[in-house]
Image (spheres, rainbow, N blue to C red):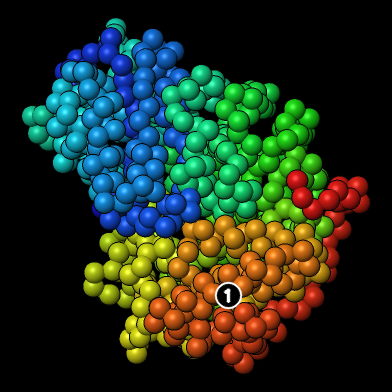
Amino acid sequence: MKPPITNNDPEPLETARRHDVLTEILGRFDLDSEAILVQIPQVPFADLQQDVARNRGYFAYPPVGLLYLAATLAGQGIETRIVDLNFEELRAAQENPETIREVVLEALTRALQGLERPLVGVSFMFDATQVLVQDVCKHIRSVAAGAVIVAGGVAATADPEQLLDTNLVDLVVLNEGEGPIEDLIEYRRTGGDLPRNLCFRDPAGGPILRTTAGTGGAVEIDIRRQYEKIPIADYHSIGSLNSFSRLRGVEIPFATMLSRRGCRARCTFCAVRNFNGKAVRVRDRHGVVDEMKHLRDRHGIRHFDWLDDDLLWDPDDAIALFGEISERLPDITWAANNGLIASAVTPQILEAMDRSHCIGFTVGLESGNERVLHRIKKPTRLEQFFKFSRTMENFPRMFSGVHFILGFPEETFQEMLDSFQVAIRSRLDWTKYFTYQPLKNTDLYHAFGGLDAQVEAISAGEEGQRAEYTPARNRHIWSVGTGAEIAEGWDVIEVARDASPSRRQAVEIWFSFNYVTNFLRLPALTSGQEERVRNGIRWLRGLVQAFPDNPSMLCVLHYLTSRIADDSGSGRALLRERAVELFRTSQFWRERDREFSFSAFLDGEIPGLDPRWDTLLSSCLEPVPAASTGVSDAAHSQGVGR
């Protein structure tokens, strides 16, 4: 297992040797040349589905990190071009999936044309996209052999060796890139001290050379001019940010914003503190709103999503930020999908969010078991979470969700059940269950000996199992009869309470928890608040766009639309036809329907639960004392629509 990158000085190698190697590498690119900044594709080419792409169901996040690097390089007098290959990939998938790879690489070729010795920055954020970053870097080498390739991002920081050992890149920038890139350019021009946070290979052999590592950096960087380098007004036409942007409407142009870097929490499964540092750095709120106003006025953006890992850090400043948004940008909406800290969501914060046209947000609880919360160092207790969930009953216009992670190392099935029961008891609009995926450069990853050890711990020796997948998307799990040793459907409740479920078993637990919480017992099915019903309809319609071959979503949507008097009967008929056809053509969904009875929704009935689950749910639905909210009636007197 490789040691984590720390904030200490690098291992004691000859400083002169590091200077010599870095000077040779940097001397190969032309300071007078345009620098190229590349966002790699985010979905393997073979996995793209044309119907999902046309429905804008894939994520289409603008490359904001590259905008900050472009602004930094502009401050050093270097012009840049941003090449968003994820945008190119999704646009090509809508038109002709058979030519996606050719279209993407041709866009990269055009950007490099005529540049003999350029500096090329490649963003590598997620380890699951390693194959794609390899493809991109190899193509850069073939088109511009003299290029100096610099990689950065969360995945690059976590394991620079995987890039340098294969000669894919010349340099890896660790942690936030603006400061190191600024140092790098200054060093290239004038020499002096070695730039911080760099890793590079000594061509004479031996270990990777590293310069002094650290975290933090400036946050007041104006990127407004850099938006001209990407088609920011068109991202909504090729994908979505998340379910919240689809909730707002697929025809609404969107963008992302960053007001804070870092997070107060010390969650052991998360890489934020190792990447951004222990402090939370807050941008001036006037500059944040200036950027939002620029995007609205010049590019037509009408919806924003926050990239912040701790949006509510400094609650007074957060309330002031939301107040300025409501005053200066009364015609926009925003959402926060990244997971707020539940204990930080106060009634006063919620009032400010509602007034500034927040359409929804999620909180990251991660576990419904106090012992697990303590082990993973989550800064929220269940009492605080339930206080928050009761307060949300006074804000039906804002769609609220909660995140849970199933399958932490050594987590027992009883601890997973606690998460399920807390989700049911909270009655928030949606629950997002994830299966635990080991992330490099996190405390939990290193505590359990790295990726291989964790896969072994949570997979119980299942040969060939990998950690990178999303159960809702990857089709290889859509099978039935996974083996007598794996409990499925209602029977997952029979898993031994003190057992740590295997990886395959965790996927089945995920399925049952997800479909009971979000389908069979979705709060909007029985809510007496029309706003929650309408939000549920909009949410499910967005999910259907991303998962067009899932008939259970169509069934729930059919039932919800029947609860709204002004909804079109012909629209419900179409939902029924699509659901029936998908059940007819999919053995997997026929088997699931026989067990969970999703199709009962099509006949106006909410399906019943297996008696074992009925008993489980009854035990967790005891009344919870309502918290005093301190919320004024005036905050909720406005109409449903915006």
Is 255 left or right of 136, judged from the image as shown? Answer: right
Residue 154 vs residue 267, the one in the foreground: 154
Q: Residue furthest left?
A: 204
Q: Which residue lies furthest to the front in this view?
A: 570
Q: Which residue is drawn at 73% across and 35% down?
A: 331
Residue 256 in percent (x, y) is at 55, 37
User: Is 459 placed above or below 201 here?
Assistant: below
Place residue 176 in its image quadrant: top left
Residue 407 vs residue 13, the one in the foreground: 407
Q: Which three-letter amino acid code belongs to the residue tagged 1?
A: Arg
Residue 413 in percent (x, y) is at 49, 78
Q: Is residue 233 visible?
A: yes
Residue 149 vs residue 58, the one in the foreground: 58
Q: Residue at x 27, y 32 (%)?
A: 108
Name the element at disc 1: helix
Q: Which residue is drawn at 49% across and 25% down?
A: 227
**10 Å crowding of disc 1: few (<14), some (14-19), many (20+):** many
Q: Which residue lies furthest to the right in this view?
A: 633
Q: Which residue is drawn at 59% across and 23% down?
A: 298
Place residue 477 in its image quadrant: bottom left
User: Is 160 placed above or below 616 here?
Assistant: above
Q: Is residue 401 visible?
A: no
Q: Residue furthest top?
A: 190
Residue 355 in percent (x, y) is at 79, 41
Is 334 left or right of 82, judged from the image as shown? Answer: right
Residue 229 in percent (x, y) is at 43, 24
Task: Provide the residue designation for mark 1.
Answer: 576
User: Is 487 placed above or below 533 here?
Assistant: below
Callout count: 1
